[in-house]
Image (tube, coloured by chain):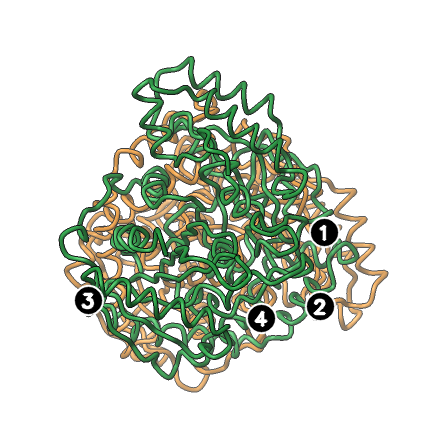
Chain colours: A green, B orange
Amino acid sequence: METGLNTLGAAEIARRIRAREITAEAVMEDCVARIAAREPEIRAFVQFDADRALAAAREADRNAPAGPLHGVPFAIKDIIDTADFATGWGSPIYAGHLPPRDASCVELFRRAGAVPVGKTVTTEFAYFQPGVTANPHNLDHTPGGSSSGSAASVADGMVPLAFGSQTAASLIRPAAYCGVLGYKASHGTFDLQGVMGLAPSLDTLGLLARAVEDLILARAVLCGSPAERKSDFDDTPPRIALMRGPHWQDGTIEMRDVCQRALDRFAAHGADVGELTHPDIFNGLTDDHATVMAFEAARARIFEYSRHGDRLSPQFRDLVEAGLAVSRDDYLSALADRSRAVRLLEALFLDVDVILAPAAPGEAPGGLDATGDPLFSRAWTLLQVPCLSIPAGAGPNGLPLSVQAVGRFGDDDRLLAAADWMHRQLADF
Amino acid sequence: METGLNTLGAAEIARRIRAREITAEAVMEDCVARIAAREPEIRAFVQFDADRALAAAREADRNAPAGPLHGVPFAIKDIIDTADFATGWGSPIYAGHLPPRDASCVELFRRAGAVPVGKTVTTEFAYFQPGVTANPHNLDHTPGGSSSGSAASVADGMVPLAFGSQTAASLIRPAAYCGVLGYKASHGTFDLQGVMGLAPSLDTLGLLARAVEDLILARAVLCGSPAERKSDFDDTPPRIALMRGPHWQDGTIEMRDVCQRALDRFAAHGADVGELTHPDIFNGLTDDHATVMAFEAARARIFEYSRHGDRLSPQFRDLVEAGLAVSRDDYLSALADRSRAVRLLEALFLDVDVILAPAAPGEAPGGLDATGDPLFSRAWTLLQVPCLSIPAGAGPNGLPLSVQAVGRFGDDDRLLAAADWMHRQLADF
């Protein structure tokens, strides 16, 4: 990676612009140069216009800093509406469609002074059918999905910050495969107006970045939480418990190894660590997630299924048909499991700040014809808790490995503060 | 009201069409005639095209019955996307905008064979600034809002069934003022893809109709619940408790009287009735609702506020500004009140099937410059429970009065069954 301004984090960029050490234009120039150099191979963007991005950055420089993200470039997953970039949802049905408005998250970023760079590749309707993006660490490997372009663009230094979303594993997995931070908020925290829905009780907006402070800053902009970095854990490191979970043996040996070594590292730096056995009901949550997702997706995307069925991928059609075949009783039974598991999980969080878990089965798989297995995120997404993917070194193929930090529902501030501490301990992992 | 086919309920229409006693075209002809006669005064529709509606009905007649709503005309509140009717959200900003798709609820209705008639008047962004619709019972009085046109069109016999939505009192109040059934589902039950959002943790899709069986049928289509009318209460009438609530004295004397007389009527027909004192925390829920609504609306509609502020009504601008001024701590405190109240309410529903409450302060107020007070719905909407407005005679001005039936969260089937029983007891009220 070059060492230009494109490698800085969002908070750092905003600080330096505010201090008049650098300009938004200079930052954008380095981002644009990086994109020009790398995009032909990585293909992170469905839409990118260097001239427009530069003009917007110059405009930011002409104005007094409007907010905490003034002059910060950001990228937008293409299931998120924008009034000045077409929004295609990763489907030929909507290719070239120009919405009449920006999604709330985009407008909140703009009001805070951030500068949109372009729209990033998503899988079809944020489900499984992959886009064209390659993993920046190895172009023959998937970047993960569905937030493929957002993860790849942040990982490659094209932008410091990007919007993604998760309904199964769509933030945590691409973040893990690309070696960046991926943050899925507590369900319902960030407004979803203008964000395509796939399964409403699971859909969650999130962010990809390279510094935890960037996530904290972006979160503050989106939901009015305090933007100061919490120092809770600088004096007393967090209490961290590894939960292997029901799929532990389905991951690679290096995944299991990285979780264990990360835990040891945290302990060595003073964290109170331990292990938690997953409650029995967790054994069924992955299937429950699939049931809920199919049932809800069948309704959320019924228009496309009914009217444009011939332009859907076979696997998306299968999802809708599976969902239409799920009985309401089975759906409600899956939701009831969720309610029970949520109560058990609440109790576990009385004694720990963070649950440590695998972020993905291992390194990014080879090939661009699939985005990897969502196995290690389905349950957490169902439980609506905040999750972070934190890079933790590389595997035998030289591709990133990551761990997942899971927090208590609604306590994202605490999770982010703990993740900041954890990220620092893993910096040279 | 004429005694044509336009006065039949949705389930009755579907049954008779299926039995080949009537045609979809004949039904639509009577609806169209009613609209032609009355629309110039009532102004329920922002878009209505008689030729298209008739053509769609004839098309339905050419096909074998596709589903349980085959041939049933329905109207659509204009915050709900349709690919073949412009969708304006009650705002000049979006007047004439044609979305690229139907909302899920519309497509689910179409798949069930229902025939869209047109788009109905909503207040601006489903908030308070009224549209042009008049109350069919007295043109000088408001129909209530925000689902103004949907309630008026059903009340006037223009259509048997219409979509509405509620974030504060937008279904229950217009239903009460217009003397029809209004059903707000448990929050999250009906998919909201393509339905404009105002405050996501409150926004709920719902229906207006003249027969409870129509609501049961429509609900089955939307969420895959069983469509058979539940007979639970035919042998053993429901347990019904009146909860006067903290605003009892803020309503009119006739509202208080109608609640009491309805309770007596239910008792006379064998229901196990009683009274429940509202828990103390309910005293603050109306304010909590206003806090949550403002905080969330400020984010959900930030684009319109930022980019089109000059085309918003002053009261909508005030809402957004109030929401931006709410601290996150105050918002979270209101949500915490909600959680506590939800638990208390769950306990109350152990002993009753239905809580009976005022639906509105009284008859529809005079004038079309406001849609009435949401006082008697804010708390129930905050608590996300299913609610029904059930007509209960008329007040001193000859305008409808109604009571509100509130059910346990997620137990909409039981509430609808109980409401069916209650509606029958109040038929000659």
* Of the pair B302 and A399, the residue shown nearer to us: A399
Residue designated by label 3? A272
Furthest residue toward bottom: B235
Residue designated by label 4? B224
How far is the residue under mark 2 from the one under mark 3?
59 Å
Q: Earlier in the sequence, mark 1 or mark 2?
A: 1
Horizontal and vertical percent position of residue A138: 60, 52
Question: What quarter of the picture does the C terminus of chain A occupy?
Answer: bottom left
How far is the residue under mark 4 from the one under mark 1?
30 Å
Residue placed at 45% from the left, 49% from the top? A180
Q: Can residue B311 be seen in this view?
A: yes
How far is the residue under mark 4 from the one under mark 2?
13 Å
Q: Which of marks 1 and 2 is in front?
A: 2
Residue designated by label 2? B67
In what element is the residue under mark 4? loop
In what element is the residue under mark 1? helix
Question: In the picture, residue A221 is in which quadrant?
Answer: top left
Residue placed at 54% from the left, 31% from the top? A117
Q: Which of marks 3 and 4 is in front?
A: 3
Label 4 near label 3: C-beta < 8 Å? no
Horizontal and vertical percent position of residue A176: 48, 57
